[in-house]
Image: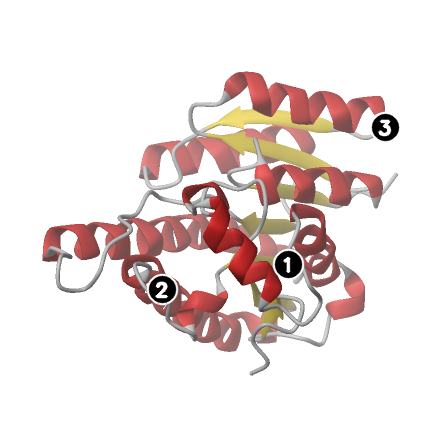
Amino acid sequence: MSERVCLVTGASRGIGAATARELACRGYRVVVNHRDSATTAEAVAGDVRTGGGEALVVQGDVTDPDDVTRLVETTVGHWGRLDVLVHNAMAPFPVTSFADLGWEQLGAKLDQELRAAYLLTHAVLPGMTDRSYGRLVYLSTGLSRRPRDGMIALGVAKAALDSFVRYVATEVAPHGITANVVAPSTVEDTAVGDKLPDELRAQLAAATPMGRLARPEDVARTVAYFAGDDAGFTTGSWAPVNGGALMP
């Protein structure tokens, strides 16, 4: 069993749950974070343990400084270290046009997106720096580069996250720490994907060269690559997972 410890935020369902399971299958000890989904988070941890892995469920709001501190301290207190951060937790956002978008709505989404990324990164870096090892993986979206009607709040906030990660990657690289972005297209069985009507999901699948939407497991395998040693010389990258729908 690997000694590596990975914290996955928003891991009670969708991409986060699939990532927790995938990393556990690869030998990581996994912290399953949730904000208010204890039952489903425990089910994910149960899947990990059934498969022979180790999992710890920790509740916490990643936009709350005290919760983030407790989340990291609980992880380190339980396993003695934290090697990998997968920041997947999604803050709510309005689906609306720019014409109908209030500054309060856009500002709130920007604040929540960057606040969570800042707090988590700031909390995990000291330990990673001390050990000269760390993997930071952030979930973004192809909408940060290719706009779609109604998705301005999400796309703009994730574009800000993409830039944040590049700056972090530059600063932490000398300490043996990588920071990368995984940017899926619409993913089935996720909070964002479930907001879309069936007709639109079918249209998006038909417009994808590989003929379907992404699945949580597709994204999880890409996240696992960046969490591992094979990606040790890759940092500041933006990795699309979209079946060819967007080729930057």
- The picture places residue 65, in percent across and down from the top left corner, at 33, 39
Percent of width and height locating residue 26: 83, 46
Q: Give the mark, 1 or 3, whose residue is nearer the N terminus.
A: 3
Residue at numbered disc 2: 155
Contact between marks 3 and 2 (CB within 8 A): the answer is no
Under mark 1, the amino acid is Gly
How far apart are the two marked residues, 1 and 2, measured between alpha carbons?
27 Å
Which mark is in front, 1 or 2?
2
State left or right for residue 87 relative to residue 122.
right
Three-letter code for the amino acid on which mark 3 is drawn: Gly
- Which one is closest to the eye, mark 1 or mark 3? 3
Which amino acid lies under the numbered mark 2 shown in the image of this protein? Answer: Gly
In the image: residue 56, left or right of residue 96 = right
Residue at 47% x, 75% y is 166
Foreground disc of the pair 3, 2? 2
Sequence-first disc among 3 and 2 = 3
Residue at image position (31%, 66%) is 156
Closest to the observer: 208 or 119? 208
- Which x, y percent locates residue 39? 56, 16
Marking on residue 51: 3
Up the image or down, 129 lies above or below 199; here it is below
**Mark seen at residue 175:** none
| Circle 2 residues within 10 Å: few <14, some 14–19, many ≥20 | many
Viewer-proximal residue among 58 and 191: 191
Q: Is residue 16 visible?
A: yes
**Dot label at residue 134:** 1
What is the CA distance from the residue labelled 1 to the residue labelled 3? 25 Å
Left or right: residue 188 compared with residue 111: right
Q: Position of residue 90 (x, y in %)?
A: 42, 45
Residue 92, quarter of picture: top left
